[in-house]
Image: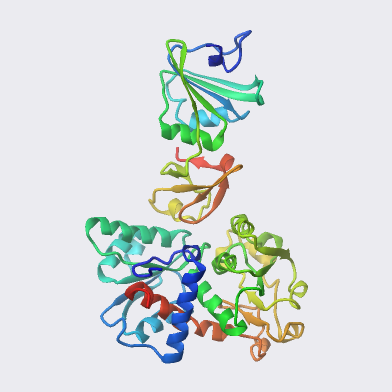
Amino acid sequence: MNEQLGGLKKGMIVSPIENGTVIDHLPPGRAVRIAQMLGLMEGAVVIIGQNLKSTKYGRKDLIKVENRFLTDEECSRIAIFAPEATVNIIKNYELVEKRKVSIPDVVEGIAVCSNANCITNKEPVPTRMLTVSRSPVKMACHYCGYEVRAEDLRFRG
Amino acid sequence: MEFRDRDVVSIRDFSRDELESIFSVAKKMEEEGYDRGLLRGKRISLLFYEPSTRTRLSFEAAANSLGADTLWFAGVEGTSVMKGETLKDTIETVANYSDAIVIRHPYDGAARWAAEVTTRRTLRGEKKVPVINGGDGRNEHPTQTMLDLYSILVTQGKIDGITVALVGDLKYGRTVHSFAYALGMYRCRIRLVAPEALQMPPHVLSYLESRGVEYSLHRSIEEVIGEVDVLYMTRIQKERFPDENEYNRVRGIYRVSKRTLQGAKPNMRLMHPLPRVDEISPDADEDFRSYYFKQAGNGVPVRAALLAMVLEGSR
């Protein structure tokens, strides 16, 4: 399964994984942020490739994580930062499933509204961000209406 | 079109037809008088976490005119908010003794949250207590917008086709955010007059663009005074600025005087949500185009209509 390496057939600079997930076609510079958002950096074996060559996009980032599989909700969160991403599930060194991600209509509980005066930043209120534009991706707070571009969206740590 | 038990959080929760039905009830109440039996036995709580003169008193006058009782606090001194009570807990409590809650709060989105809290109570078998936003932080002030639109209807005979200038603090001013959203429902031209640092926030502008509204950005009132039907002044709100230097750079930047009004059309009306500080000089008060005090008076019939419709349903 050559695709496991994100299109790197020759001169393997990113080693293959036995079981886990390859998140491919991330915009350059986004991999670390996405890995942090998904909490992949805590304990699991993670390989991050940055600015790799991509025939389709010129340059791309890529994340490989061992023994970790993503929920639909996690795939949706990836889509906010990387609408073109693909999520590849690897079992026994083989690609067993390739999934496209899709931008969620609502992100609940995990994002932080960027408006410091928003009730969600002042009192214990669960956040709710609504997708108001898909290209470019923009989210708005359900409570105060404040809009942010996807790249500026922050998540609760 | 159902109004009963409806929350009034954002002006965007209402269609143009719905707004117009509120205006027609308000007009009828103004012309035929208030029915003091309409809301007899109802209790309306007015929770004002921030200072207010017109919004609180006109809600109270509206409620009393229809026979409802009011409970209120004005300022959090003397309430459990001082002991650290959350908004959720205050709303959960007050909902037990209220048929409707009007709230003014310093945080953006507080009214939406309060409305959700009373909606969640219904899952426990409690009745829905509608929440009316009397101004939440820098976000919205929908009932002010309702009376502003009503004031335009009264003075211009229509809203479609007119040109409105919004002047002053367009960044932090909640009244102008709600007002701009509402004007987006009509075929108006909007002139936004503000220093660069206080221009309308991008999310409001993108809303206007999505509605195909013709708007333009300006720095001075003189650029627009000759063409507008409504000149809507706002106060530069010291209390909303994160830093005093930013406030000092823009304070007193716009002033309308009797002389400014000489360049205006005869049908033009000067409006202001009030309070004013120095953006309209007292010598303009006697000009026939100055409408701000009458505009504040329109708060009573419009808020009475809204309370009647939310508590008794559309009629």
Q: Quadrant of residue B80?
A: bottom left
Q: Image quadrant for the N terminus of chain B?
A: bottom left
- B267 in relation to A154, above or below: below
Question: In the figure, is residue B5 to the left or right of B133?
Answer: left
> Is residue B9 positioned above or below A24 on the image?
below
Can residue B77 be seen from the camera position used here?
no
Give coordinates of residue B168: x percent, y percent: 65, 69
- B240 or B142, which is in the foreground? B142
On the image, the x and y values in percent for residue A109 come to 41, 44
Q: Residue furthest left?
A: B125
Quarter the C terminus of chain B occupies: bottom left
Q: Quadrant of residue B228?
A: bottom right
- Residue drawn where x is 48% and y is 36% of the image: A77
* Colour convention: rainbow
Q: Residue at x 61, y 60 (%)?
A: B211
Q: Position of residue B133 (x, y in %)?
A: 43, 67
Residue B190's x, y, as percent?
67, 68
Compared with residue B189, is residue B275 higher up or lower down, i.e. above or below? Answer: below
Measuring 38% from the left and 68% from the top, which residue is drawn there?
Answer: B2
Residue A29 to residue B21: above or below: above
How many circles with numbers are drawn on the protein? 0
The quarter holding residue B259 reads bottom right
